[in-house]
Image (cartoon, rainbow, N blue to C red):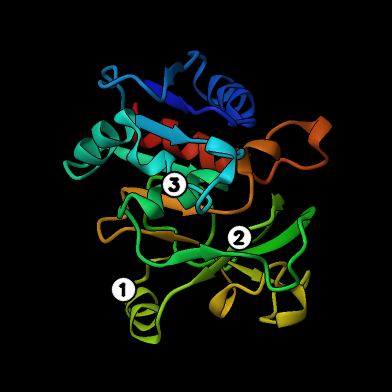
Amino acid sequence: MKAAVIVFPGSNRERDAVAALERASGTKPHLVWHRDTELPDVDLVVVPGGFSYGDYLRSGAMAAHSPIMRAVKAKAERGLRVLGICNGFQIVTEAGLLPGALMRNAALKFVCRTVHLRVENTDSAFTGKYRKGQIVRYPVAHHDGNYWADAETVKRLEGEGRVAFRYVSDSGADDPLWNPNGSVAGIAGIFNETRTVLGLMPHPEDAVDPLHGNLDGKPLFDGLVEALS
C-alpha cells in the first residue's frame, strides 16, 4: 500500500500518522506540503490532526481551500481512500467530502483523554479488521470536535450505515455522559456514501504501539494495508 500524508502549517500529528502507516505497511508514506498541486501515485491519503492555519476562521476552513486539497477532493471523487483524523476530519468536512460540521465542544473546553468507541460498521477498508459492535479505545485531543448535522442528514447517515464509530461508555452503552464533546447521536466518525472517505475525531494512530497503552488503532491501519495492497 502506498500512502501520502498531507502537511499544513499547524499540523502536529503528521509524524504519528507516518509512524502508524510505516509500522503497518513497511513502507514510509510520502509527506505532501499543502501548497503542492498534485498527489503522488498512492492508494491512501491521510489528512492528519493539528491546528491547520492556526484554526483561524473555523477549524479546517482555510486548509480545505489549499491547493493540495483540490487534488485530494478530485481523486477522492474517483474513489481514492481518504482518512481525515481530528483536524483532518474538520478539513475534509469543510472541503465537502463529508456532510455536517465540527463545532466547539459542548463544554467549551479542550478535551484530551482516552475515550471508548463502538465500531458501528465494518463494511469498509478502514474498519474491516474490527467486529461490528466492538468497543475500542482511542485518544482524543480537540477543542472543536462536536459533530453536528441536521436531523435529516443524521437519519440518512444512520440509515445508510455511514456512522463508523460512536462514543459510548466503557461497557458499550449509549450514554451522553461519556460523549466528550456533545456530538449529535454520539457520532465520532462517519463515511462518505461509498465508504471510501472516513473522518473521525479520535486518534487511531496514537493507539498502535504498546507504549501507547493499547493497540486498538492497529486494526484500522492493518485493514487498510490488507484492502489496498
**Viewport quadrant of the N terminus:** top left
Give the SS element for disc 2. Answer: loop
Q: Secondary structure at mark 1?
A: loop
x then y, percent, for residue 188: 57, 63
Density class for disc 3 (Cα within 10 Å; few <14, some 14-19, many ≥20) is many
Label 1–label 2 contact, CB within 8 A: no
Q: Which residue is mark 2?
A: 145
At 31% across and 48% down in the image, what residue appears?
Answer: 196
User: Gap between marks 2 and 3, in whole Å?
Assistant: 12 Å
Residue 142, position as x, y percentages in the image: 68, 52
Residue in the foreground of this view, choosing between 53 and 12: 53
Residue at image x 75%, y 72%? 107
Name the residue: 35% across, 58% down: 98
* Label 1 – label 2 distance at C-alpha: 23 Å
Given this view, does label 3 or label 1 mark the residue nearer the observer?
A: 3
Q: Is residue 78 visible?
A: yes
Check disc 3 and give the amino acid type: Ile
214 vs 199, left or right, is: right
Name the kind of residue labelled 1 in the image. Answer: Glu
Q: CA distance from mark 3 to mark 1?
A: 23 Å
Eye-nearest disc, 1 or 2: 2
For residue 154, side relative to residue 136 (left or right) = left
Q: Quadrant of residue 104?
A: bottom right
Task: Mark 3 or mark 1: name the one nearer the start of the chain.
Answer: 3
Asked where in the image residue 16 lies, by quadrant, the reply is top right
In the drawing, what numbered circle is on residue 160?
1
Instruction: State the residue at coordinates (37%, 43%).
Output: 64
Relative to residue 157, is residue 98 depicted above or below?
above
Read off the residue under disc 3.
91
